[in-house]
Amino acid sequence: MVALMTLTGIGVTKGQSPILSNIDMAIQPGELLMLVGPNGAGKSTLLSLLAGLSEPSCGTLSLQQRAGHSLTRREWANWVAFVPQLTSMGFPLTVEEVIALGDMGNQQGVVQQRRRLRQALTSWELDYFAQQEVRVLSGGEQQRTQLARSWLQATHNNNQLWLLDEPLSALDLRHQQQCMQHIMALKAQGKSIVMVVHDLNLARRFADRVALLRCGQLVACGAPAEVLTLPQVQSVFQVDVQWQSQWLSWS
């Protein structure tokens, strides 16, 4: 199987500080890859590279066997949908207007665009907030708005890679479950999803593969049971843990 994206010897340096070092990994079509690791491990920096928003200081990144640096921003946008960590909106846009941004590249008619927009609002339970300005909403409601925008892009604009940076962090339990249902549905359609998470139990339950990072280096990447071993988790996170009924708990 040809990898959707391949990273070879990737490094990122800011000033004199290495942020990522010698990252080798591939993202396969139709897989859910979860990035885990302590704060400052380089997860968000890696996700930014995968989104084409920054370039590595060294190494090569290819998307569908094309060098990443040769792709235009439009070409990146045709392949990748991205939700960064929750940030404040700089413009007074309504929920509906923000979500509609996810369908800007679609050339179908206005009727179809309105139908897809309504579907996104309903799927993420945002109908009630459609005409409200995003900046007055709670953090969780803003997060769902951004997720709905990106989901619309990934669902209808043929994007093959959905990148999510801590998508569950501001959501309540119900909407965490809803978000994971959308993620698994897109995976079932053959989309690839890479997401940053801090919940190792979530990674163990849902991920096809887990990439474990520490201090900018890739400690391990593979099946959850192979990566999230007690010795490895204890070493990377510097915390005592144990398995209780197949769930990881702190002791």
Image (cartoon, rainbow, N blue to C red):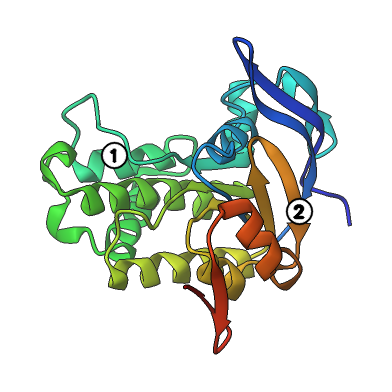
Position of the N terminus by quadrant: bottom right
Query: For residue 72, which numbered disc appears in the image?
Result: none
- Residue 172, image x and y in percent? 27, 65
In the displayed structure image, the side of residue 46 where residue 126 appears, left or right: left
Towards the viewer: 174 or 101:
174
In the rendered image, the vertical position of residue 203 relative to residue 243, given as above or below: above
User: Picture quarter containing residue 104?
Assistant: top left
Q: Amino acid at mark 2?
A: Ala
Name the residue beneath numbered marker 1.
Answer: 98
**Element at badge 1?**
helix
In the rendered image, the vertical position of residue 37 relative to residue 185, given as above or below: above
For the point 71% across and 38% down, the residue is 217
Q: Nearer the viewer, mark 2 or mark 1?
A: 2
Q: Determine crowd level at label 2: few under 14, some 14-19, many 20+ residues with C-alpha closer than 10 A.
A: some
Towards the viewer: 32 or 128:
32
Name the residue beneath numbered marker 2.
Answer: 220
Whether residue 200 is visible: yes
Q: Nearer the N terminus, badge 2 or badge 1?
A: 1
For the point 46% across and 71% down, the residue is 181
For the point 53% across and 47% down, the residue is 38
**Element at badge 2?**
strand
For the point 74% across and 30% down, the residue is 21
In the displayed structure image, the side of residue 38 where residue 179 appears, left or right: left
Towards the viewer: 42 or 137:
42
In the displayed structure image, the side of residue 19 where residue 149 appears, left or right: left
Q: Amino acid at mark 1?
A: Val
Q: What is the residue that sits farthest to the bottom in this orientation?
A: 245
In the rendered image, the vertical position of residue 165 relative to residue 46, given as above or below: below
Towards the viewer: 217 or 231:
231
